């Protein structure tokens, strides 16, 4: 049994992660983080390594995954959904890909804020394409329940 | 630091340091009682909190193994994480957002209002809104709720602007930025919110109320509290009379310890609390401690919990500002003409990119999922929180096939949604979508329930011992020196976020417990008749001859 993932398995897994969560604006670097996490899980774990190598082999059959176009890759992944390899890549990618300041920046999320004083002076209320609504409205003359503003 | 002896027979042992346990500890310490708080988690200072969703989750969340069963989707999406709560000093008040509606009158009367619905194990609370109102007043003051006690409302943040404009356009008439436990202005020795956008990761600047930096340090300052972090209680011990004698726990060094106690109060959240009592079975209590009713662990509720996210053509940046500072009340009344009983609130909600990916559509992938994530900056969000029906078959049990790090059976959470829950969720999703469409949403997403932040009902209050686990003061019907002090004691869940009610009940329970201890009404192991000593070590009080029936049953 191999102790480490083959280069081919790593390359294919990167393509699989990108096909699962396709963001054209993101560089391969963002997906490499996913592959590193999967490789770390496989490291020294024959069962996980075998799951990955087998999952890659299935995606390469009959046509190597690398040679498929985008829609064929999606089709291949739909067929693989439910396999242990698919589950491993999906569960890892959805965490690792989006837990990355590089990705946050691409999507307009600013991440940690306390060290910059929060947003109280940096636009927590800068939305200007709607009118400013009331911060409290109670148009019912007769209060119902007890949840009404007091 | 106060440290009581393991064999000190005067201490009150409290399991858990969150909204229930932490509040109870301070209230009792202020009254002069000797209190030991046993908290399974570590003691983190707010400075240690991190503005990073996954790192914070690993720091604060209760990650001890749990199992799930039943048809709810969480059992498939998060099979070992039925609840998203905290394991740290301060408990789940460390990561809560701060929404604090009161219960409504009818929500104390499920049996009256919801009776006759198949599969609902409805029961009226043994108390009414009027009983709780004075304690709600005190709890709101303690928590410093925006919009109460002369404290201003929080300002509108970006996410609220979308939410409230939508509310107006669909015709809602009662909404606001929340009775919310984060300071709009400095108060009670804590600063105003800096609108940092991180609620579920702990308030680093302490602007949001948590027992971690309010109740607990105040209790410590009395010299009456012995706070023991990393103390995981595995059993409540009882004697041949059936009275609690103390608790057995595993300390931070992995050693088993026994802390004697005159009273034990359990506040470990509605999964750990019944787990602990079930795990404390003896030959006298073969079905678990305080379970002669058979209701212990049953009637587990987790609230409606669903969300709607919407994307717009222009930026929202919902992550800026107080995470849940928005609250619509119009759907909360009980109006069965909608096709379900009970009601729900719409509340503001925002997640960062990491948790949006994890929760927006668990298991989701592909181009549509990617497109949702790319719309993050233009996204607004709301949460739907409503009353779910108590069902006897929704329950916490011990899973003897899986043991935890201490060799104890892990809790299993079984949950099937009631048709009323499903009808309410469908209505709520539709209402949330309509709200966002009215202000120009280009797309909306229905997000399913995720691991429960509100866990309720597994040791419920009842007037009669055969219907529930504890009486109107949270005192076990079967074991008079055992109390339940968290949302496990809720008879039903109401639509409201539970923390305010947990705190109000804890204040009330402390008052009751203190009076009963001073008068000697609560029998204590080894003291068949109360010996008249003041539990706090002050002047003798009480009258040994007054050992009487349980006051709740008078």
Image (cartoon, coloured by chain):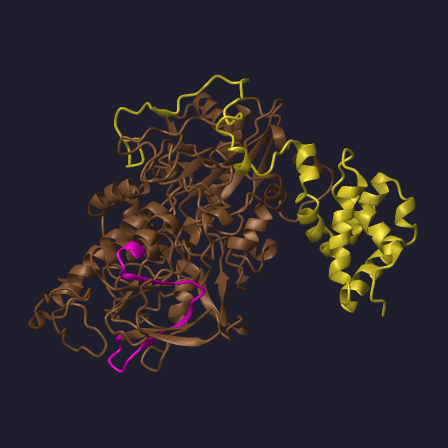
Chain colours: A yellow, B brown
Which image quarter is the C terminus of chain B in?
Answer: bottom left
Q: Residue at x 44, y 60 (%)?
A: B394
Quarter of the image for residue B549 reads bottom left
Q: Is residue B384 above or below residue B258?
A: above
| Residue B271 seen in the current view | yes
Viewer-proximal residue among B163 and A1: A1
Q: Residue at x 76, y 67 (%)?
A: A45
Residue B277 lies, in percent from the top left, at: 37, 69
Residue B489 lies, in percent from the top left, at: 32, 58
Quarter of the image for residue A24 reads top right
Residue B221 lies, in percent from the top left, at: 29, 54
Is B226 part of what is drawn in magenta?
yes
- Number of marks in picture: 0
Residue A82 lies left or right of residue B390; in this view the side is: right
Q: Is residue B211 above or below residue B471?
A: above
Q: Residue at x 26, y 71 (%)?
A: B479
Viewer-proximal residue among B5 and B107: B5
| Residue B126 seen in the current view | no
Q: Is residue A78 above or below residue B338?
A: below
Is B532 part of what is drawn in magenta?
no
Q: Residue at x 29, y 43 (%)?
A: B142
Residue A9 lies, in percent from the top left, at: 85, 55
Which image quarter is the N terminus of chain B in?
Answer: bottom left
Q: In the image, which residues are magenta?
A: B219-243
Q: Is residue B249 above or below residue B175?
A: below
Residue A101 lies left or right of residue B403; in this view the side is: right
């Amino acid at each position: 049994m191999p102790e480490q993932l083959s280069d081919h398995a790593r390359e294919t897994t990167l393509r699989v992660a990108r096909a699962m969560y396709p963001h054209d604006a993101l560089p391969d670097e963002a997906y490499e983080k996913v592959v590193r996490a999967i490789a770390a899980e496989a490291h020294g774990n024959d069962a996980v390594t075998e799951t990955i190598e087998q999952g890659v082999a299935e995606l390469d059959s009959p046509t190597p995954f690398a040679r498929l176009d985008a829609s064929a890759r999606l089709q291949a992944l739909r067929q693989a959904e439910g396999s242990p390899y698919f589950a491993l890549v999906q569960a890892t990618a959805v965490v690792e890909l989006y837990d990355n300041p590089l990705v946050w920046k691409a999507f307009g999320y600013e991440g940690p804020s306390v060290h910059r004083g929060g947003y109280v002076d940096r636009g927590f209320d800068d939305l200007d394409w709607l009118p400013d609504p009331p911060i409290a409205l109670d148009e019912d003359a007769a209060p119902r329940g007890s949840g009404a503003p007091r | 630091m106060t440290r009581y002896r393991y064999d000190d027979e005067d201490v009150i042992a409290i399991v858990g340091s969150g909204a229930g346990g932490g509040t109870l500890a301070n209230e009792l310490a202020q009254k002069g009682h000797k209190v030991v708080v046993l908290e399974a988690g570590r003691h983190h200072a707010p400075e240690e909190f991190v503005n990073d969703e996954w790192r914070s989750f690993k720091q604060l969340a209760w990650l001890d193994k749990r199992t799930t069963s039943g048809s709810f989707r969480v059992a498939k999406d998060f099979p070992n994480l039925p609840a998203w709560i905290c394991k740290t000093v301060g408990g789940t008040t460390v990561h809560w957002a701060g929404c604090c509606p009161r219960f409504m009158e009818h929500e104390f009367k499920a049996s009256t209002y919801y009776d006759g619905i198949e599969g609902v194990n409805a029961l009226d609370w043994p108390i009414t809104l009027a009983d709780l109102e004075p304690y709600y007043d005190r709890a709101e003051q303690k928590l410093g709720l925006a919009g109460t006690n002369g404290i201003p409302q929080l300002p509108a943040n970006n996410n609220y602007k979308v939410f409230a404009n939508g509310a107006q356009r669909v015709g809602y008439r009662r909404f606001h930025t929340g009775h919310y436990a984060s300071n709009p202005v400095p108060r009670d020795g804590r600063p105003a919110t800096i609108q940092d956008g991180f609620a579920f990761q702990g308030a680093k600047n302490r602007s949001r109320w948590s027992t971690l930096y309010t109740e607990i340090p105040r209790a410590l300052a009395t010299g009456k509290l012995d706070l023991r972090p990393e103390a995981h209680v595995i059993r409540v011990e009882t004697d041949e009379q059936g009275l609690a004698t103390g608790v057995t726990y595993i300390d931070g060094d992995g050693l088993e310890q026994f802390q004697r106690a005159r009273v034990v109060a359990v506040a470990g959240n509605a999964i750990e609390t019944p787990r602990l009592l079930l795990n404390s079975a003896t030959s006298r209590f073969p079905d678990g401690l305080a379970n002669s009713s058979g209701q212990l662990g049953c009637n587990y509720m987790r609230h409606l919990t669903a969300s709607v996210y919407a994307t717009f053509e222009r930026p929202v940046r919902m992550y800026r500002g107080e995470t849940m500072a928005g609250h619509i009340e119009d759907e909360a009344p009980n109006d069965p003409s909608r096709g379900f009983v009970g009601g729900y609130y719409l509340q503001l909600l925002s997640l960062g990119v990491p948790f949006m990916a994890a929760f927006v559509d668990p298991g989701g992938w592909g181009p549509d999922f990617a497109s949702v994530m790319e719309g993050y900056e233009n996204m607004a969000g709301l949460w739907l929180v409503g009353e779910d029906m108590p069902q006897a078959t929704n329950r916490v049990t011990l899973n003897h096939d899986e043991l935890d790090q201490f060799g104890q059976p892990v809790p299993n959470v079984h949950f099937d949604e009631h048709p009323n829950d499903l009808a309410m969720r469908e209505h709520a999703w539709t209402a949330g979508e309509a709200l966002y469409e009215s202000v120009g949403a280009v797309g909306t997403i229905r997000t399913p329930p995720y691991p429960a932040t509100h866990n309720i009902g597994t040791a419920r209050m009842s007037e009669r011992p055969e219907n529930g686990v504890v009486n109107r003061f949270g005192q076990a019907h079967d074991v008079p020196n055992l109390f339940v002090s968290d949302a496990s004691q809720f008879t039903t869940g109401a639509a409201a976020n539970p923390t305010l009610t947990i705190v109000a009940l804890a204040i009330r329970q402390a008052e009751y417990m203190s009076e009963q201890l001073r008068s000697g009404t609560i029998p204590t192991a080894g003291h068949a008749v109360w010996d008249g000593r003041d539990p706090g070590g002050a002047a003798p009080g009480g009258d040994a001859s007054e050992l009487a029936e349980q006051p709740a049953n008078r």
